[in-house]
């Protein structure tokens, strides 16, 4: 008992834990400046060991208040000093484990009852037509270490798992060569005003007007463009007049009709005012991610392994992207890494948003929102602005930001 008292309850141990706490907070600030806020949260602020230090400090304070009888009137200043730390720790714990932060966007003359959480969640969803199965976990992903997660979802008495494998910051989607992959053809179509990327897997086909476009499949129209793989090379065959331009030297040519010709990259093909060019040609590839180039804004990306019914597949989960669909073990899943939508038991209606600027400047001086809380038959007018928050049913609403056209509030 003496050793335990010395390690956790003595004044000396309190000083040590306070120093550890201060050092960790300083380290988190450095981590945030070197990497990003999410890494600081993953390694320090949101870590279990950091919460444990605060818990030990709280227990230590309670014990020493009792041990040194600080609740006596003559020791009132010391009692208030120690009690204030307890209030801070308890308040931080309640906020951390029983609360959440989020954004609510409302346009003028419109209402909302949905909040998008500030923190992103790893999410896995599946459905069998009758039931929807979901599991999620709030997760900060760091740029260094400590990113393990393993989501578990029971479907038809079988366990589906989503397990962390790798992380790439600021990445873009890419097809990665793999012997366990499938043939992929990605084409960019364009005309004078529009462009569109089309990804085809072996056996896919689509029709453009009266012409059939296929990849490794039999054309369905008399007019066709057929692309296929032979001896690990891509070939094109068509009965239409197609011209092309070689990007490297700007030379031009035409594809011979009804003849097998190697489908070459770095060429722009043209037919009837429509251009198309291959962006990706892979004999066997899986969907992955690659580090974005300089001056290219990508998204933080997780590679995770989804396993179900004796089958496994790696999936790419990009931050704040729409859910990625993947079929594993005969079951379709959707995985995402994004904020959660939380529905409130009431709505907030925005009557008017007002932005004031400094005289002679476009810099905002202040902004405010005239809102109406709508909860069934109950309605309450309120004005939210700097240092004037709305408290209702355990939720606090601060004026955070506004839409670029100044027609909505956040």
Image (cartoon, grey):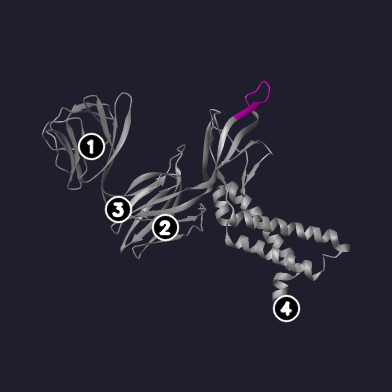
Residue toward you, 331 or 140: 331
Give yes or no for contact between labels 3 and 4 (Cβ–Cβ under 8 Å): no
Q: Earlier in the sequence, mark 2 or mark 3?
A: 2
In magenta segment, residue 177: no
What separation in Å lies between label 4 and label 2 (alpha carbons)? Answer: 45 Å
What separation in Å lies between label 1 and label 4 (alpha carbons)? Answer: 79 Å
Asked if residue 19 is positioned above or below residue 230 in the image, the reply reads: below
For discs 2 and 1, the disc positioned in front in the rendered view? 2
Locate residue 211 relative to residue 304 in the image: left or right: left
Residue drawn where x is 70% and y is 55% of the image: 88
What separation in Å lies between label 1 and label 3 (alpha carbons)? Answer: 21 Å
Circle number at residue 178: 3
Q: Earlier in the sequence, mark 2 or mark 1?
A: 2
The segment highlighted magenta reads 353-363
Secondary structure beneath label 4 = helix
Circle number at residue 2: 4
Give yes or no for contact between labels 1 and 3 (Cβ–Cβ under 8 Å): no
Q: Earlier in the sequence, mark 3 or mark 4?
A: 4
Give yes or no for contact between labels 4 and 2 (Cβ–Cβ under 8 Å): no
């Amino acid at each position: 008992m003496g050793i335990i008292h010395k390690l956790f309850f003595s004044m000396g141990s309190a000083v040590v834990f306070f120093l550890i706490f201060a050092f960790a907070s300083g380290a988190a600030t450095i981590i945030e400046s070197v990497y990003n806020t999410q890494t600081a949260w993953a390694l320090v602020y949101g870590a279990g060991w950091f919460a444990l230090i605060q818990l030990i400090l709280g227990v230590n304070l309670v014990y020493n208040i009792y041990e040194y009888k600080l609740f006596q009137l003559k020791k009132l200043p010391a009692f208030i000093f120690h009690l204030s730390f307890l209030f801070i720790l308890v308040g931080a714990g309640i906020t951390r484990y029983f609360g959440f932060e989020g954004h609510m966007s409302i346009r003028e003359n419109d209402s909302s009852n949905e909040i998008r959480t500030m923190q992103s969640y790893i999410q896995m969803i599946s459905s069998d037509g009758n039931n929807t199965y979901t599991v999620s976990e709030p997760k900060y992903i760091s740029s260094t270490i400590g990113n393990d997660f393993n989501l578990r979802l029971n479907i038809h008495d079988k366990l589906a798992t989503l397990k962390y494998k790798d992380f790439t910051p600021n990445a873009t989607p890419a097809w990665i060569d793999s012997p366990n992959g499938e043939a992929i053809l990605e084409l960019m179509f364009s005309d004078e005003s529009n462009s569109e990327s089309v990804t085809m897997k072996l056996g896919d086909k689509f029709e453009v007007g009266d012409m059939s476009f296929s990849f490794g499949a039999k054309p369905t129209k008399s007019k066709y463009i057929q692309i296929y793989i032979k001896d690990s090379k891509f070939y094109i065959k068509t009965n239409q007049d197609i011209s092309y331009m070689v990007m490297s030297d700007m030379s031009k040519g035409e594809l011979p009709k009804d003849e097998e010709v190697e489908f070459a990259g770095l060429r722009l093909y043209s037919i009837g005012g429509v251009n198309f060019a291959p962006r990706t040609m892979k004999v066997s590839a899986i969907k992955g991610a690659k580090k974005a180039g300089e001056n290219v804004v990508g998204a933080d990306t997780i590679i995770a392994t989804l396993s179900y019914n004796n089958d496994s597949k790696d999936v790419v989960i990009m931050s704040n992207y729409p859910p990625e669909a993947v079929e594993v073990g005969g079951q379709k899943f959707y995985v995402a890494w994004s904020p959660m939508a939380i529905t409130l038991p009431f709505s907030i209606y925005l009557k008017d948003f007002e932005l004031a600027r400094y005289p002679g400047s476009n810099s905002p001086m202040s902004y405010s929102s005239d809102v109406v809380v709508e909860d069934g038959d109950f309605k309450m007018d309120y004005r939210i602005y700097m240092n004037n928050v709305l408290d209702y049913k355990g939720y606090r609403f601060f004026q955070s930001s506004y839409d670029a056209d100044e027609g909505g509030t956040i």
